[in-house]
Amino acid sequence: MASNPADLKAKYEEQGFVVIPNLITPENFQSLERACADVVSRTREGSWPHRRTVGKQFPPYDSKDPDSWGVQHLMHPDLGQPAFSQWYCSTPVVNAVQNLLGCQEDQLQMELFNLLINPVSHNFALRWHRDDISGDATQEEEQRALDAWKPYGIQWNTAIYDDACLYVVPGSHKIPRTSGQRAHSTGPDAPVNPLDMPGAIRVALRPGESVFYNQNILHCATYDASAPRATLHGCMGNIEGGPLRARNILQHGLNWMKEPQFGEGLDPRGKAMLVRLLQLYNTAGDVGYSLSGTFHVARVFDEDARAFVPEVHCGVVAEANDVPHLTAKIAEMGERIRQLEQAVATAHPSDRPLALLSPTPQLSPEAVSSPTDEGAGSLSVNKDGNAVYFGHTAGTEALFSMDGSVNFDSQPPFSLAAITKSLPFSSDMTSWDTPLALERLFAYLPIELRALSLCDVFFRNGCWTGMPITQSEAEELLTLIYHCPNRNSSSKHPVAPQQMAILYLIFALGSLVDLDLPPYNSDADHYFDCACAAMSVKPWFESPTVVTVQALAMISCFYAHGGRRFSMDAAWITISLASSISQRIGLHREKFGSDLPPRSLERCRALFWEIYSIETIYGLSVGRPTGTFLANISCPFPPDEPQDAQPFVKLFPGYRHGRWRWTQEVTVPIMESFLTATKPTYDTVLAVDQKIRKFIHSSPFESFPTSLNAESPAAFAQCHLLPLFSKIMLMYIHSGHFVEAMRDNPVNPLASAYSPSFLAAYRNASEIIKADIRNFTTHPMLFTRWWAIWKNLFNAAIIVGTVATRYPSFKVAPHAIIELFTAVDLIEKGAVSSGRARSGLAILRRLRDKAIGIYSQYSGHNLTPPPSADPETEEELKIFAGYTRIVANKVLQRGPRYTAFSKPEPEGKPSPSTALWMKELGDVRQEFDPSIVQYFDSAVPFVNVVPLPEPQGPSAFEDSGFFFTHPPNTTNVDMYGAYGAESYPDDAQMFVQEEVQWPWVHVLPTS
């Protein structure tokens, strides 16, 4: 065993671990042994709650199992065992750490100190893992993470009894896993025999020996219930590690270390190391969990430091102006029917009681007060007088339906009827003559050069939310149809009608995103009609194929993109049908296509994951669940297409897998948690939050290479869209509880059980607005055509506007107002060319004007009472939060203050109110986000954007939009017990009123 410090360091760097004896002096050993026995006894009897529970391998730990495999926070003052902190800060330990890390003592920061113990009821084991690198990381991701993990921290085990629980793979801290090692370290299961891992060895310690090891060495552990174990488990870090150390350390919850009582019990060396830890703590922000979740580490802040929130009354009620009238009318009708039945019963006695004369079942108080129907969604009436259902994740669309929308000046001469009339019937006059019908459809094809261009445009600009066809497949389809052999022979036609439909759908989607054409041009509608005609040539319901599924998915994408045919109801119905057929033919099973050529099999698997991805996001949009559950899917991800099989645009390696992982880890958990018959608890909301944040931390998109020059739309979309969508999802899952926090505690929402949602909704709304500045200034012609973007921006504007109008004394108020102005300005500019952008604009203008009035009134003064509620705004906020079951159209009732048909304010500069406000805030502009200041400094309209014709007549697109709005109103759950009231610290500091000072949180400068 090496004893020279230089030899120890060399061995540690080569192997990733090293055993050092005698770090515990004989006089300290007995005191540590007694202290360990005491804390183990207290943990097992239940008096010490901070423990690692059997059944939960990594943090956050729960209390579901009474058995424990670890004791947390040995230095906590409440344990009353100073022997632990004295040894942690002792010279032998500090010298060993300092030598192995190669740093000075004044660079060391205090970190974790816990105790690993044996369970008592059954054996337990940890899987093979690295402490801060996910087990499902690709080889490239693993190598990048290992390269980034500099020697900024170290952990160790020091045995009090004989200990042979730890297994390691020497040298694995420097290189990615081999395929054999990956097979033993992917998935949640612990190994049956750890030595099955290639290269693994067992580390045996005698009492008093310590093993120091790199936290990202491959390691696992076994816990034998019959073998006593008490092993001190600690770590220290180098302050130069900064954020690289933060997540691995702060995920364990170290709020107690800020208490004066803890610092007072340390020696000078310990106090100095503690100060360095707290500096990291106060700057780390949202750190997440390394291996099992990403709900971030909390900070404690004082009760008097929390800001007040004005009351917002939110309940599941019908619109205030209509419910009393409707209720009275229903009561009157019921009474008249009752009188009629009474008369019938008197005139014609019968043994069978009439319906309304039967005893009315009485609901229990619990049933009356039950909020079960709060998540049932909303009903509205469209322009045709038909009922429209908005699922409970589609509240913004219900809000849009109140003010109506715009329409195009005239509908184009859709060509479907003309096309189908020209198709000849077969001799039996019961179906089309397929070969002749296809020949007619060939006549509508564009020239080959234009067809190639439209395919190229589709893959460069239009496939980023759904790619049901691969590039190589599209190229083959072009060749097949434009160079069709034996087209005029009497034998079977070589082109199937559904293949023709798919090509026309590529043309239609390509025309929508062809930036050389006007938005929503007639070419797109014409090609879509040709596709529909091709789908009708031959029946496909009886024996659908993979091509059928592909065509239906393409139709769904067209409906959802925007324009005259925009209809999320139609998009949802079509993609649901495609998904149902895909399951019917077995696409979701791994065994599907075992007899297919490898390339065809890979295409089928890619098609399934694209359909599943599209189905989940459209389902969330309209508030309806999918019929496909993740647990029933065994279809694996296909490999990336080779670069030479991508003739139109080169996808970054890992992009498609990242998209499908986003479905697995983000949209599916939301759908399976929220779109159910029973409402999720608030703990479920927080658990979904963790999953989304885990995906954000591990996703590859923002690591894709970017150009110093202007990025192409394809590169921009691959790098930025799905990270943005993840933030959108975070905003949406919290938006209902954003309102609920104000309802729960009108004076102080940060003291509410829903404060994490209040803060997360605002933070993500702010980031979405800033991201949209980048989107619209980088590629305005593309993003203004994509209707999904406007709904998300509208949601973000509602949230920041609510903060601005209800908290004028908060330091964040100027920021919230400018963010609201930014969103309104973007939407006003977009309304020049996008009918979807005009929806809801009247609501945002009212909110903007209200924010100006309130902030102007209260700027320079501390606001004691919350601002008085505006009934109209309150109604809109209820609908936004999903609390309104019956939504009446305001346009039909009274006409809004600003109509949805109002023209955008003058181009080329911000709206007058925005410009005046920016001048008014000139002295504090330097405090705003630079992207927002730069945006208003340039203040130019979107360039090269073709205006829409002036709106005429009623809406053509009043149904649900691309993304959903809010989760259902979950029950009131005390989340403090599980997560701590000190959540979302980086956001919370922005809501401090001017006179408040927080001891541990940096306060934004006053405006």
Image: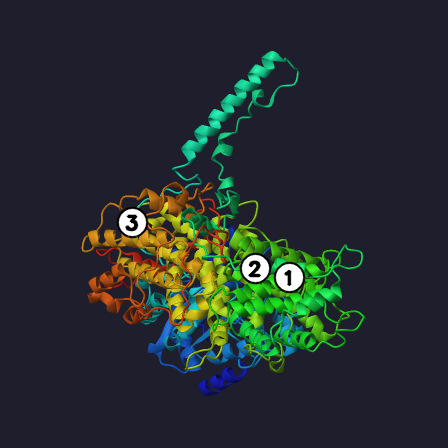
Circle 3: residue type? Phe
Q: Name the mark nearer the viewer: 3 or 2.
A: 2
- Mark 3–mark 1 Cα distance, whole angstroms, equals 64 Å
**Residue highlighted by disc 3:** 308
**Residue highlighted by disc 2:** 414
- Percent x, y for residue 471? 61, 75
- Percent x, y for residue 855? 24, 54
Label 2 Cα neighbours within 10 Å, binned few <14 / some 14-19 / many ≥20? some
Q: Quadrant of residue 774?
A: bottom left
- Determine if residue 192 is in view: no
**Residue highlighted by disc 1:** 419
Question: Where 190 falls versus 452 (above or below)?
Answer: above
Q: Tell me if label 3 and label 2 are in contact, CB under 8 Å.
A: no
Instruction: Pick whichever, 74 or 904, lies toward us.
Output: 904
Label 1 Cα neighbours within 10 Å, binned few <14 / some 14-19 / many ≥20? some
Circle 2: residue type? Phe
- Mark 3–mark 2 Cα distance, whole angstroms, equals 56 Å
Instruction: Pick whichever, 97 or 688, lies toward us.
Output: 688
- Mark 2–mark 1 Cα distance, whole angstroms, equals 10 Å
- Determine if residue 308 is in view: yes
- Percent x, y for residue 462? 53, 69
Image point (38%, 52%), residue name: 900
Quarter of the picture containing the C terminus is bottom left
Q: At numbered mark 3, what does the secondary structure look like: helix, strand or loop?
A: loop
Instruction: Pick whichever, 722 or 794, lies toward us.
Output: 794
Choose the circle earlier in sequence order: 2 or 1: 2
Label 3 Cα neighbours within 10 Å, binned few <14 / some 14-19 / many ≥20? many
- Percent x, y for residue 491? 81, 71
